[in-house]
Amino acid sequence: MIKNEIEFILNDNLIKIKDIDTNVTVLNYLRSNKKLTGTKEGCASGDCGACTAVTAELNNNKLTYKSINTCITFLYNLHGKQLITVENIGKDKLHPVQQSMIDNDGSQCGFCTPGFVMAMFGMYKNKIKPTNNNIDEYLAGNLCRCTGYKSIKNAARKMYSYGRNDKFTKNKKITIKLLKSINKNDVIIDNNKKKFYIPSNLNNLIKETQKLSKFKFLSGGTDLTLEVTKQNKEINSLIYLGNNKDLNYINIKNNYLHVGAATPINDLIPKLKNIYPSFADMFYRYGSIQIRNVATIGGNLASASPIGDCSPALLALNSSLLIQGKIQREVHINKFFKSYRKTTLKNKEFIKEIKIPIFKNCIFKCYKISKRFDDDISSVFVAFLLNLKKNLIIDMNIAFGGMAATPKLASKTQKFLIGKKFNYNNIHISKKIIENDFNPLSDMRASSQYRNIVSQNLLERFYLEVKNNRSETIN
Ligand SMILES: Cc1cc2nc3c(=O)[nH]c(=O)nc-3n(C[C@H](O)[C@H](O)[C@H](O)COP(=O)(O)OP(=O)(O)OC[C@H]3O[C@@H](n4cnc5c(N)ncnc54)[C@H](O)[C@@H]3O)c2cc1C
Ligand code: FES
Ligand code: FES
């Protein structure tokens, strides 16, 4: 049965919604409709973290807590989840996270504080050890312009000393019961000529896609929502893939990693760690934890940005995509990008799966160059896949982002290096060849000259790291 309303838990109460505009963000709903103004708007583009709230989802009878940027999340994405806001966590008694912020002087003007508190709450609920690295990872998506980060980080470091169980742990059974009571059937919201469709499985998704004439697919929304919040556009029909169980999976089969296109990047990182550690490490610099909790590889590829980080890595790895329309077809990623922001996706087609080969005897490394270490878009990105036998280059893929209108292989450089000795002399020659592979543009992220020099230096860096068998560092 198809429903015409979504259901979610807002703090402790089950809410049903059907008549709010389908382009409204969670942030605007909280502040304007519910007068829950603790959640702040700083940038409205996912960059500052002031709007952070936390969702809880039911997976195998367990609650999974995720911090999200409410400014770039559509309200109707909340179907089937609990949304926890800053007003609720310390309603009866300050939450350990809040108490620690006070005791460690973690706030001055206070504008960023609710966002930091909720980012720390996400860390607390996931029982993350408060090491320096973990604190940096969990707070990298939040900006503060007056307190300074030292005292905020101290608050995160000490938050567990105020107790490890909060009211959410005590109320777990009630929350799970409430979440289970939510009907998981398909939802179609239809108001004021705008539609928001939430298909629960692949068959229904295909059927509905064929029926509708003009719509956009929505996964994490970390790209698409900005069309509404930053470009003031209206999106009339949206098909939400984030709740679709048939697009959310990670399997290893026949030497391939199969990733459902709507799987959040954060779910993928632990699996990638054992297979391609450098790829997994790169993802720690992909947006922030709030972004990675919802952003998908499918959305990254479909947006076809020349500086998207997944594309060059997947290109170097010879990946392919399962594309679903009325029928399914498999496309090698090298054929997927046609020109600037254009792909081979036809009307009504969506990416169902990303198929990543597992190369057991090859070296894979990737490097991201950006102006800021955390939460920044690449100026240049490169991924290398090297098959080396007795110091002879049997095969090699070198894929760049940020060097052309699409993610692109350095074909001339590859051709020169394959069959040659992996030595400094050949790398030195290939540094000149790489200049002929690309003609990068200058923009606010980097000049053409900078991009050329960096691409050459990254080639040399890769060589030196492989030669010296250094650990897989990226920056
Ligand atoms: C603060 C911030 C930081 C960011 N940092 C990075 C970064 O470090 N590196 C990086 O590469 N990107 C970054 N991004 C961009 C964005 O987060 C990524 O591209 C992300 O992977 C997009 O995935 P999504 O699921 O959110 O896509 P969505 O926003 O849901 O969709 C993006 C586009 O793809 C289409 N689409 C979505 N899923 C599918 C599908 N399965 N099939 C066909 N079409 C589909 C949508 O219609 C839309 O056109 C950042 C964005 C923000 C806001
Ligand atoms: S308001 Fe800045 S991340 Fe949402
Ligand atoms: S306390 Fe003022 S911005 Fe952080």
Image: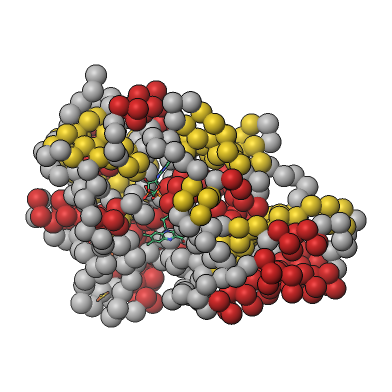
Residue 294 percent across, percent down from the top left: 38, 48
Quarter occupied by the C terminus = bottom right
Q: In which quarter of the image is ligand 3?
A: bottom left
Determine the residue positioned at 22% across, 30% down: 188
Determine the residue positioned at 21% across, 37% down: 195
User: In the rendered image of this protein, does residue 291 appear above or below residue 456?
Assistant: above
The colour scheme of the drawn protein is secondary structure
Q: Residue furthest right?
A: 390
Residue 3 percent across, percent down from the top left: 20, 26
Is 302 on the left or on the right of 75, as rendered? right
Q: Is residue 173 visible?
A: no
Front one among 340 and 297: 340
Q: Which residue lies furthest to the top in this view?
A: 1
User: In the rendered image of this protein, does residue 170 appear above or below residue 316?
Assistant: above
User: In the rendered image of this protein, does residue 245 appear above or below residue 238?
Assistant: above
Is 13 on the left or on the right of 454, as rendered? left
Residue 129 percent across, percent down from the top left: 46, 58
Is 65 on the left or on the right of 237, as rendered? right
Front one among 290 and 313: 313
The quarter of the displayed image where residue 159 is located: bottom left
